[in-house]
Image: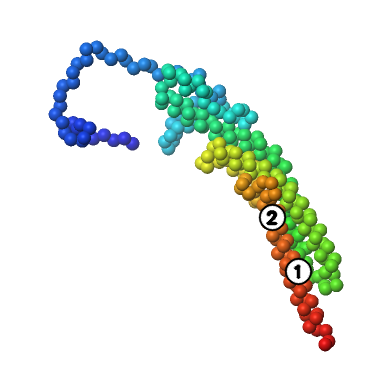
Amino acid sequence: MTRTIPLQHPLDDTGLPVRQVQAPVPAKAAPPPAAAADTSRYDHPLFVRVTPGQYGGWVYSFGAFTGREERPEMPAAVWGDKAVAYEQRRELGRQYAAAQVMWSKARLRAQAQPLLREAAPLWEAWQAAHAELQDTFRAFWNTPDGRWRAQLLRLTDAERAARAAATAWDRTASELAWRVEEQLREAGEDNVLALTVVAREIGLDASGWEIAWAGEYGPGRTPMVEALNGEIAAQRDRLAEVARLAGAIETAQQPA
């Protein structure tokens, strides 16, 4: 809050006291300032009003965005309208910045909701396939030596099923990640709309879904598949280690 204090002596530009002098009387009175121009014609079509915020700043209210409108842009004619004052242009700029945030959230909802519905069964399929892979690997602990070949076949089948599920998940997760990235660019970090919120609005719980940052997706870049490949490689290394140890033990037990 701006505060003022009375001065005992008037100061000049240097901050030093100066002697008061009487200002000369102008020969002709200055004309009154021009009335502020009506800028309502430049408002966004969905703009309703602006009111002071509860904790400072301003709250901009708009009609409902669908997300399918064109990106809100302040009309170019504002810059050439000499009747519009500088502060009025700034105010219009703030209005359109707020409109872009509202529009970006509506667009994310419109784009992400069908993708979220598509992703829900894919996530369940991935979880089931991944659990089957882990269970099949753990089964080696209880598989008799004579049944290892059959269990290896089961393991390779489980690997293929898990890779297929991970690939399908990465494909849809990539689309969702890029939609979120676009909304972030439009609205800024302070106005990000979380996918979990959008999912909850349509009755889905996406809190446990693994969706990487958009930059981690791209040609040949599939985070879920890459993580799965690392897990499969570790499992195979363990099996190879056991096979080597078993062979060494068998060789050591053979009579000389």
Counting residues from the start of the chain, the first of labels 1 and 2 encountered is: 2
Q: To which residue does mark 1 refer?
A: 239
- The foreground one among 56 and 242 is 242
Residue at 51 percent across and 41 percent down: it is 190
254 displayed left or right of 198: right
Mark 2 lies on residue: 226
**Can residue 124 be seen?**
no
Amino acid type assigned to the residue bearing label 1 in the image: Leu
- Percent position of residue 84, x then y: 43, 20
Q: Position of residue 180 (x, y in %)?
A: 61, 41
Q: Is residue 61 positioned above or below 121 on the image?
A: above
**Residue 92 makes an appearance in the image:** yes
State the residue at coordinates (77%, 78%): 248
Q: Please tell me which residue is depicted at 33% across the width and 36% down the height of the picture.
A: 1
Instruction: Identify the colour scheme used.
Output: rainbow
Q: Position of residue 6 (x, y in %)?
A: 21, 33
